[in-house]
Amino acid sequence: MRIGMLTSGGDAPGLNAVIRGAVLTGTTVHTHEFVGFKDGWKGLVENDTLPLSRHEVKGISKQGGTILGTSRTNPFEGRGGVDRINEVMAENGLDALIAIGGEGTLAAAKRLTDAGVKIVGVPKTVDNDLDATDYTFGFDTAVGIATEAMDRLRTTGDAHNRCMVAEVMGRHVGWIALHSGMAAGAHAILIPEQKTTLDQVAEWVQSAYDRGRAPLVVVAEGFTLPEDDEPHSERGLDAFGRPRLGGIGERIAPLIEERTGIETRATTLGHIQRGGTPSAFDRVLATRLGMASISAVNEQHWGRMVALRGTEIVHVPFAEALGKLKTVPQSRYDEAALLFG
């Protein structure tokens, strides 16, 4: 078979390991051929390709980013659409397409599959918010980076007796904030799933300060205060019409200082959470998902994505992956909240 492959949406540590796992399995076990599309759906719409053989994927599993490039292009806008996708796939002699991406990518893949395009998906999101898989690659690396950054923030906070606010990724869910905050010993963790008042945050901060600690507050970018209707966003919309989030840490830091009198500083970790070398866990998971995507193609599981359930890789329909987000359960937050203040 001849298979196209693309990475779309935000990058995540482990994307290259997926590509390598798929290409090595497909070429050495099944004698498949691969064509890579540059910059996600944009490359597919514009027929911008590059070869994918063993030579192109050697040694890439330890690299961050993606050798294919990525973008947030919507394949149905501009020159795109089902007819254009079919035309490009026919020109390249493709039998199937492997789309690696998050919620937006998989939603586009589902729409194309419903129209007859043969697509298998591989889930990717550092937020770990896709409900159909237990973990997504990139999440473990992002948590590790955020935890290390918070460890560093705590030392400078201790030196100045300041409250430090660390803003991490998490558009709709607080998994990165929860895991990194617990690992770093945060005195408050603010996530989109929980409506938390500033008075409560100030109480936690003051309690830690009164015990001689420099308070650490971790906030997910999608967190909203009770009086807010939408997450904090100052940077417009992306190609799929979603707000570009960021800045909630800078917003709440002066409010904490105003309520407590404690000097407070905010740091937004942003894209550093996506960059650099993927963790060993993410390399292994991504490689396994890439290998499993070839099995899905061979078995013609169109309109399905590979997913991790426990320690096993399974195939699930796109609809199941897109049905709802995997949010932080109340019990998990309550468990972490026992350590606040």
Image (cartoon, rainbow, N blue to C red):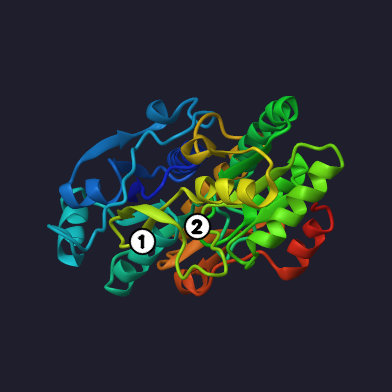
Question: What amino acid type should be assigned to the residue bearing mark 1?
Answer: Arg
Real-space CA distance between mark 1 and mark 2, rounded to the nearest whole angstrom: 10 Å
Q: Which x, y percent locates residue 273?
A: 54, 38
CB atoms at circles 1 and 2 under 8 Å apart?
A: yes
Asked whether 308 or 224 is in front, the reply is: 224
Outermost residue, right side: 211
Left or right: 150 in relation to 30: right
Residue beneath the point at 31% across and 51% down = 72
Outermost residue, left side: 79
Asked whether 63 or 9 is in front, the reply is: 9
Total marks shown come to 2
Asked whether 203 or 117 is in front, the reply is: 203
Left or right: 45 in relation to 71: left
Left or right: 323 in relation to 203: left
Residue 175 appears in the figure:
yes
Quarter assignment of residue 211: top right
Residue 180 appears in the figure:
no
Q: Which x, y percent locates residue 115?
A: 27, 73
Residue beneath the point at 49% across and 29% down = 63
Badge 1 or badge 2: first in the primary sequence? 2
Question: What amino acid type should be assigned to the residue bearing mark 2?
Answer: Arg
Left or right: 106 in relation to 14: left
Residue highlighted by disc 2:
171
Residue highlighted by disc 1:
242
